[in-house]
Amino acid sequence: METNIIKTFRAADSGLGKVLGHLEEDVMEVLWDKGEVTGKEVLNLLNVKDKKIAYTTVLTVLERLSKKKLVKKEKVNGSYHFSPSHSKMEFSEMVSKEVLKGILDMGGGYASANFVDVLAESDPDELEKLSKLIKAKKRELETK
């Protein structure tokens, strides 16, 4: 999988809006939901959601996402069709790994301790899962 897809991380935003622009996120949601679509289909689906977006704006966003290698662009019967390069789950996995690597680069020990503290406060069940994952990874590394 590709790395370094994140240029900006906006901690205050929610969901994938932390790493994608809001319109980019909306366009990606359409692609993840529908698969392969034309720019016109994306426009129509976005405009149904009480938004009035220009066709040229949608095409610009699709081109930008294509340059970021998040969207595949293919000419079919004279018109361009767009599809996601990765599933939403694959994209989320790539983003989370990249963000975590960036955080660990700032200071691994502090970041790890803070991660455990935040996880314990927000989701103790996930903390238990993490503990099991760590034990399994340690066993895996010992057998190598």
Image (cartoon, rainbow, N blue to C red):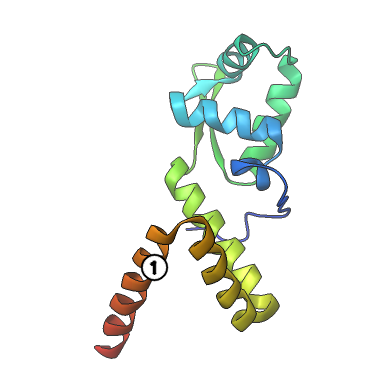
| Relative height, residue 33 to residue 85 (above, below) | above
Quadrant location, the C terminus: bottom left
Indicate the secondary structure of the residue bearing disc 1.
helix
Please name the residue shown 70% across and 76% down the image.
Answer: 106
Up-down relation of residue 144 to residue 123 (above or below): below
Residue at image coords 60%, 9%: 48
Whether residue 74 is visible to the viewer of this picture, yes or no, is no
Instruction: From the image, tell me which residue sits under label 1.
Output: 130
State the image coordinates of residue 25 (x, y, percent, origin top left): 62, 34
Label 1 CA crowd tier, 10 Å (few <14, some 14–19, many 20+): some
Front residue (pair 1, 142): 142
Give coordinates of residue 116: x percent, y percent. 52, 70
Total tally of numbered discs in the picture: 1
The residue located at (71%, 15%) in the rendering is: 55
Q: Tell whether 130 sits left or right of 26.
A: left
Question: Type of residue at label 1?
Answer: Leu
